[in-house]
């Protein structure tokens, strides 16, 4: 019988898969990276979809909407940059010229 790995090893693999998928559909390393993420992919078929984090389901749901790419980006930024755990770090290195535009983009209704 083939060794399929321990539960911990399998969990680590799933974490890596989830991180890679999130990076593909909503890269939160910067606003530019989020804009350059994939906004078309809206479904991933896996043997164990219940192991995928809710955040990936949310992003795929945004991608599935019949809205413009700019609105998808805005939704992703609102959900993953401006949420209850607001992180200022992605904005600290931003040029002052861009700050008002980014804030206006995020403040616009969906």
Image (cartoon, helix red, strand yellow):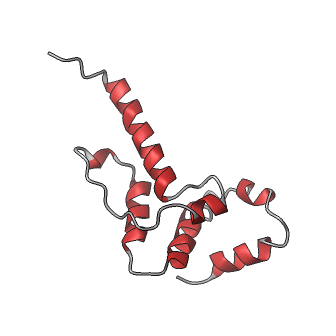
Residue appearing at x 41%, y 55% in the figure = 56
Residue 91 is left or right of residue 81, and the answer is: right
Residue appearing at x 31%, y 25% in the figure = 7
Give the image quarter of residue 95: bottom right
Question: What is the count of numbered marks?
Answer: 0
Does any portion of residue 83 appear in the rendered image?
Answer: no
Q: Position of residue 10 (x, y in %)?
A: 33, 29
Q: Position of residue 43 (x, y in %)?
A: 31, 61
Residue in front for this viewpoint, 38 or 65: 38
Residue in front for this viewpoint, 19 or 108: 19
Residue appearing at x 62%, y 65% in the figure = 82
Q: Position of residue 54 (x, y in %)?
A: 39, 55
Does any portion of residue 18 appear in the rendered image?
Answer: yes
Quadrant into which the N terminus falls: top left
Indicate whether 50 appears above or below 14: below
Residue in front for this viewpoint, 51 or 18: 18
User: As drawn, which residue projects farthest toward the bottom?
Assistant: 109
């Amino acid at each position: 019988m083939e060794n399929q790995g321990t539960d911990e090893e399998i969990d680590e693999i799933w974490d890596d898969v989830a991180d890679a998928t999130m990076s593909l559909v909503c890269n939160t390393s910067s606003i530019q990276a989020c804009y350059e993420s994939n906004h078309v992919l809206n479904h991933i078929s896996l043997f164990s979809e219940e192991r995928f984090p809710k955040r990936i389901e949310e992003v795929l749901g945004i991608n599935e909407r019949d809205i413009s790419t700019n609105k998808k980006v805005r939704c992703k930024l609102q959900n993953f940059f401006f949420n209850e755990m607001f992180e200022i770090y992605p904005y600290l290195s931003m040029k002052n010229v861009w700050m008002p535009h980014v804030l206006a983009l995020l403040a616009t209704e969906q």
